[in-house]
Image: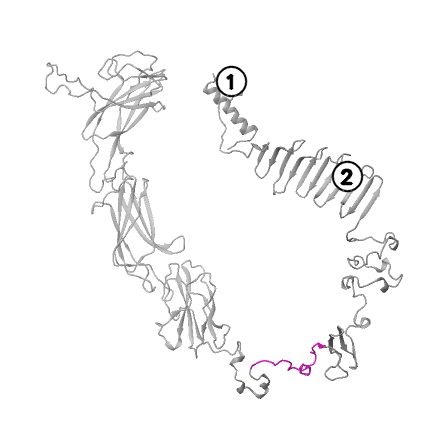
């Protein structure tokens, strides 16, 4: 429709019109056309097409227009003088009979420099017909009205003759069939290492603008088996099998499509491959003898020697009998072994272990697997444990390999790896429960065990111990000596005196178990071997303990009684190593500085004349005062650094408690004014976010920037755009608050 922002001059069918700065007329060239698929069609099952016109035009020199306004006269009503029923016009076929003059407004087309416009979506005619196209030049604020070709001062127009689109035959309802078709089949391995059947189809697209792609159908007969015979799971298909590709777009010179199948033929089969063309909305129907097709012959895959039909055998395979922990009256056994995988065989998928009873001889119909499918990484294998119930047969174990499609080799004596002659037997090891023994059948030497296999209380005398092993006697009084039951070296613990003793070398008396002069070597008792508070002043000879007699670091808590060592007993310069003091109170005064070290002040440095605390290390942190006024200074805790004013109010803190840094600035009387929190990235003023993380997704504007003042009531769109562009540029480049 015409743009209503333009002034309209003159009227349809009118004569010459005032210029009103209208641009000069253009000259229309030769119009061409083609049929295209209707982009707005929502129907399928028919080949719907619309007309597309290309209208060239030439602009005169100094042309001031912005574009052309197109109109369609369908059919051409202005080719000849109209028929008038005025009693004078002869009905001899020389005059055109038509109704009211009507044109279709196709809208304005801005001049893009190509010198042509394209009109599409025009209904296809059912017979040959003439169409007339008008092009009316327009400019800023001027859109002249259309003037019919038969009127005075007509608008530029041109006529084109249109023939109807072709009628398509069955099998080409939507697009022309492909020009050529070919196919091939071969066996190989896919990206997962599995053996598959590849079928490759190739074709040449037709020279048809409606052609958008193809559908491929592969028709397979019924004589195929998803697994080759002998795999124990093969199922013969009773019906034919069709494989459909789905839509394959593309109009390239050489089309190609490859599919992979895991179902292989057991005998040679002939597969028919058909290609159906499509325009993207529908697909041609199949017409036998017309639709492009090709037949290829596919044979079964090649297999190896018996025993290695599908893949390689294991280069090395071992097996042995293993026994589990026997329960009461039940013994168990199983099998365990190792396997070496074949090298450089990508078809190898794994192996499975089978068992064969030697009593069956060469008959392997009763063999069965004793493991599940083992993968190519299972270099060891084992079975479950089974109970041994009577004499067991002699077993042979062998391993059958299978490929990546789970197709297994068959057993062949000279090819399949096998271990012979494995015979589980009853074991003599394991647990023995006493209640299973009949005391009446025991040897007389076991009579002591009476009705159970055990040792009665107090039945083992000291004489029953072999030489070199003696128990510690527990007695209330010392046994009389000498006594052969208590030879030299026998130890006792007297529960009355709570003293441990031993028989002396003569075997005639009990002596203390530890003789200080004999059993303790010189220099072997250190401070940490002495019970606290057990050495008193009375035990020390006066003058025998000097600084040179004390090993550094051997005085620990609890070794010295309170008040036993004072300054008069410590020589100057004799304490030169680290000293641990329990609950000390130390006061050091030097000039105008006093240092207190105690449990109340911790470590305190102050001026004794003023009482001003200069530095104090507390359990909560470090307090530093920078002036003589005690309230003013700085403090440091484990996660906080702060500063206080003369009134003792915290005016600034740097807090890392939450794992992030947070800077807070307070008023002189308290209350937060500004804060910067690294956990959020926001700068706050009086609790409100004023600057936050950079906003992304912006791009720098181009053109003129302006930061000048303006009156919003008279500002133009350009004024506002220039200042907005300047603001975005400043935020982007100067402040970094926004970015891409």
Q: Percent position (x, y) of residue 58?
A: 31, 20
Residue 710 image label: 1
Q: Helix, strand, or loop for circle 1?
A: loop
Q: Is residue 495 above or below residue 123?
A: below
SS for dot 2: strand
Looking at the rendering, the stretch of residues picked out in magenta corresponds to 452-474
- Magenta span includes 425: no
Q: Is residue 648 visible?
A: yes
Q: Badges 1 and 2: C-beta atoms under 8 Å apart? A: no
Relative height, residue 308 to residue 34 (above, below):
below
Q: Quadrant of residue 663?
A: top right
Q: How many marks?
A: 2
How far apart in space, not on screen, are marks 1 and 2 (Cα)? 61 Å
Q: Nearer the viewer, residue 308 or 596?
A: 596
- Closer to us: 455 or 418: 455
Q: Is residue 319 visible?
A: no
Which residue has dot 2 on it? Answer: 613
Mark before the other along the chain sequence, 1 or 2: 2
Q: Residue at x 72, y 42 (%)?
A: 622
Pinpoint residue 210: horizontal percent, then vertical percent: 27, 37
């Amino acid at each position: 429709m015409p743009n209503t922002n333009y002034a309209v001059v003159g009227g349809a069918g009118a004569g010459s019109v005032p210029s009103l700065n209208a641009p000069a007329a253009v000259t229309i060239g030769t119009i061409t056309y083609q049929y295209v698929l209707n982009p707005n069609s929502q129907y399928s099952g028919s080949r719907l097409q619309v007309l597309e016109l290309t209208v060239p035009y030439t602009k005169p020199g100094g042309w001031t227009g912005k574009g052309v306004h197109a109109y369609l006269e369908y059919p051409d009503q202005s080719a000849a003088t109209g028929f008038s029923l005025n009693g004078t016009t002869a009905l001899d076929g020389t005059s055109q009979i038509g109704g009211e003059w009507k044109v279709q407004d196709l809208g304005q087309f801005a001049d893009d420099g190509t010198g042509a416009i394209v009109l599409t979506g025009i209904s296809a005619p059912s017979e040959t017909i003439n169409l007339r196209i008008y092009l009316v030049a327009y400019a800023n604020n001027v859109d002249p009205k259309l003037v019919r070709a038969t009127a005075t001062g007509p608008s530029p127009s041109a006529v084109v003759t249109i023939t109807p689109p072709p009628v398509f035959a069955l099998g080409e309802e939507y697009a022309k069939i492909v020009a050529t078709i070919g196919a091939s089949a071969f066996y190989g391995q896919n990206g997962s290492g599995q053996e598959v059947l590849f079928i490759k189809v190739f074709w040449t697209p037709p020279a048809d603008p409606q052609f958008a792609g193809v559908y491929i159908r592969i028709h397979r007969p019924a004589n195929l088996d998803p697994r080759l015979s002998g795999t124990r799971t093969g199922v013969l298909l009773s019906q034919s099998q069709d494989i459909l590709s789905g839509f394959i777009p593309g109009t390239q010179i050489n089309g190609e499509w490859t599919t992979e199948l895991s179902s292989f033929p057991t005998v040679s089969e002939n597969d028919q491959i058909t290609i159906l063309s499509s325009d993207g909305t529908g697909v041609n129907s199949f017409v036998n003898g017309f639709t492009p097709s090709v037949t290829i012959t596919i044979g079964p895959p090649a297999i190896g020697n018996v025993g290695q039909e599908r893949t390689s055998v294991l280069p090395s395979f071992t097996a042995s009998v293993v026994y589990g922990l026997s329960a009461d009256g039940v013994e168990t056994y199983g099998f365990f072994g190792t396997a070496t995988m074949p090298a450089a065989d990508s078809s190898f998928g794994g192996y499975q272990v089978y068992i064969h009873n030697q009593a069956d001889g060469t008959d392997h119909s009763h063999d069965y697997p004793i493991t599940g499918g083992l993968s190519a990484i299972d270099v060891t294998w084992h079975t479950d444990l089974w109970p041994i119930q009577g004499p067991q047969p002699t077993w042979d174990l062998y391993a059958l390999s299978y490929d990546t499609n789970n197709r297994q080799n068959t057993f062949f004596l000279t090819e399949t790896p096998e271990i012979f002659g494995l015979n589980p037997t009853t074991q003599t090891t394991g647990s023995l429960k006493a209640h299973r023994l009949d005391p009446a059948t025991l040897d007389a030497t076991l009579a002591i065990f009476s009705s159970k296999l055990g040792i009665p209380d107090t039945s083992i005398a000291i004489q029953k111990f072999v030489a070199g092993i003696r128990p510690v006697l527990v007695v209330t009084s010392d046994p009389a000596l000498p006594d052969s039951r208590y030879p030299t070296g026998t130890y006792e613990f007297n529960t009355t005196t709570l003293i441990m003793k031993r028989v002396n070398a003569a075997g005639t008396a009990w002596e203390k178990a530890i003789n200080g002069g004999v059993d303790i070597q010189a220099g072997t008792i250190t401070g940490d071997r002495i019970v606290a508070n057990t050495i008193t002043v009375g035990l020390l000879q006066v003058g025998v303990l000097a600084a040179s007699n004390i090993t550094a670091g051997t005085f620990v808590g609890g070794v010295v009684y309170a008040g036993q060592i004072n300054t008069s007993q410590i020589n100057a310069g004799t304490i030169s190593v680290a000293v641990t003091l329990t609950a000390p109170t130390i006061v050091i005064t030097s000039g105008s500085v006093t240092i207190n070290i105690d449990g109340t002040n911790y470590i305190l440095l102050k001026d004794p004349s003023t009482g001003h605390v200069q530095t104090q290390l507390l359990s909560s942190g470090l307090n530093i005062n920078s002036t003589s006024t005690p309230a003013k200074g700085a403090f440091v805790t484990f996660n906080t650094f702060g500063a206080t004013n003369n009134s003792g109010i915290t005016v600034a803190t740097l807090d890392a408690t939450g794992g992030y840094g947070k800077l807070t600035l307070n008023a002189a009387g308290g209350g937060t004014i500004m804060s910067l929190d690294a956990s959020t990235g926001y700068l706050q003023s009086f609790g409100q976010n004023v600057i936050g993380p950079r906003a992304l997704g912006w791009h720098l504007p181009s053109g003129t920037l302006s930061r000048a003042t303006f009156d919003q009531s008279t500002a133009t769109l350009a004024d506002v755009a220039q200042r907005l562009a300047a603001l975005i540029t400043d935020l982007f480049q100067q402040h970094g608050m926004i970015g891409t």
